[in-house]
């Protein structure tokens, strides 16, 4: 057991250092939905955790929070930010969540944690509702079997030692990935899939804010 790591505790890692370029509203952590910032939504959703670590854009003043919340400067990429948070985490298990997903369904979190404790790594996912094709230089390409594909969400859950090993392997090999489950899979470990929830969509484009405002008006955690 690593010194400082508490076997059965849960650390939530929030890589929130993105500048929100596609959204065009400044640092994504400070974008407001339903009268609260995206960071507020995440901190409230994971208030039950043993600790919450947040990576913010360098130079951004951290808001005042309770003792269980720690802020660190983020890296140039999401992957760098997660690694920084991971090395500072004290939980035996970690949940990595994108603050751009403000609507966290606790039942999904519970499924992720249960699967991570059982198999070492887990991610929530939802079915693809539309026809899935390849884009062939702006033309309609071959259709793919959407029943074999999933849309991956967060939070993703891991035994901390497994995710740390995957990140250190990626750093040594120069491997980049868009989420943490890809790194764990690349190292050769299986990642369990559990049922996600469509309400846990990611706010990426301005039109996503319209959907988020509508859901925020009726949201009950």
Image: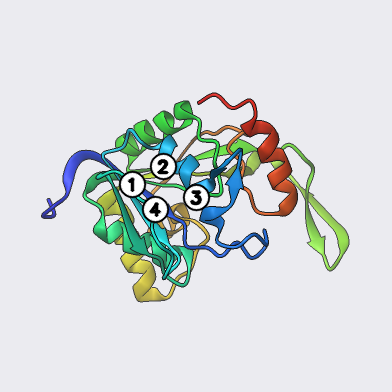
At x 50%, y 35%, the residue is 104
C-alpha gap between disc 1 and disc 2: 9 Å
Q: Secondary structure at mark 4?
A: loop
Depth check, mark 2 against mark 4: the one in front is: 4
C-alpha gap between disc 3 and disc 1: 19 Å
Q: Are marks 1 and 4 in contact (CB under 8 Å)?
A: yes
C-alpha gap between disc 1 and disc 4: 6 Å
Instruction: Look at mark 3 in the image and give the residue it sits on.
Output: 98
Q: Secondary structure at mark 1?
A: loop
Q: Are marks 1 and 2 in contact (CB under 8 Å)?
A: yes
Instruction: Look at mark 2 in the image and give the residue it sits on.
Output: 43
State the image coordinates of residue 110 (x, y, percent, origin top left). Answer: 40, 29
Q: Label for residue 63?
A: 4
Scheme by which the image is coloured: rainbow
State the image coordinates of residue 25 (x, y, percent, origin top left). Answer: 64, 59
| Residue in front for this viewpoint, 206 or 132 | 206
């Amino acid at each position: 057991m690593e010194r400082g790591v508490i076997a059965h505790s849960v650390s939530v890692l929030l890589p929130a250092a993105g500048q929100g370029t596609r959204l065009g509203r400044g640092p994504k952590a400070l974008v407001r939905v339903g009268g609260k910032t995206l960071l507020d939504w995440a901190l409230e959703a994971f208030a039950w955790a043993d600790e919450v670590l947040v990576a913010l854009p360098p130079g951004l003043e951290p808001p005042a929070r309770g003792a269980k919340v720690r802020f660190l400067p983020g890296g140039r990429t999401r992957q760098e930010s997660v690694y920084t948070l991971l090395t500072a985490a004290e939980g035996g298990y970690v949940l990595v969540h994108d603050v751009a997903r403000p609507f966290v369904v606790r039942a999904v979190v519970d499924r992720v944690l249960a699967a991570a404790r059982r198999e070492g790594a887990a991610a929530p996912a939802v079915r693809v509702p539309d026809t899935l094709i390849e884009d062939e230089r702006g033309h309609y390409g071959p259709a793919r079997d959407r029943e074999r594909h999933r849309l991956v969400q967060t939070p993703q859950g891991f035994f901390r030692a497994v995710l740390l090993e995957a990140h250190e392997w990626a750093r040594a090999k120069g491997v980049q990935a868009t989420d943490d489950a890809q790194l764990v899979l690349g190292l050769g470990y299986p990642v369990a899939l559990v049922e996600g929830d469509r309400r846990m969509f990611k706010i990426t484009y301005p039109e996503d804010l319209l959907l988020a405002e509508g859901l925020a008006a009726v949201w009950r955690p």
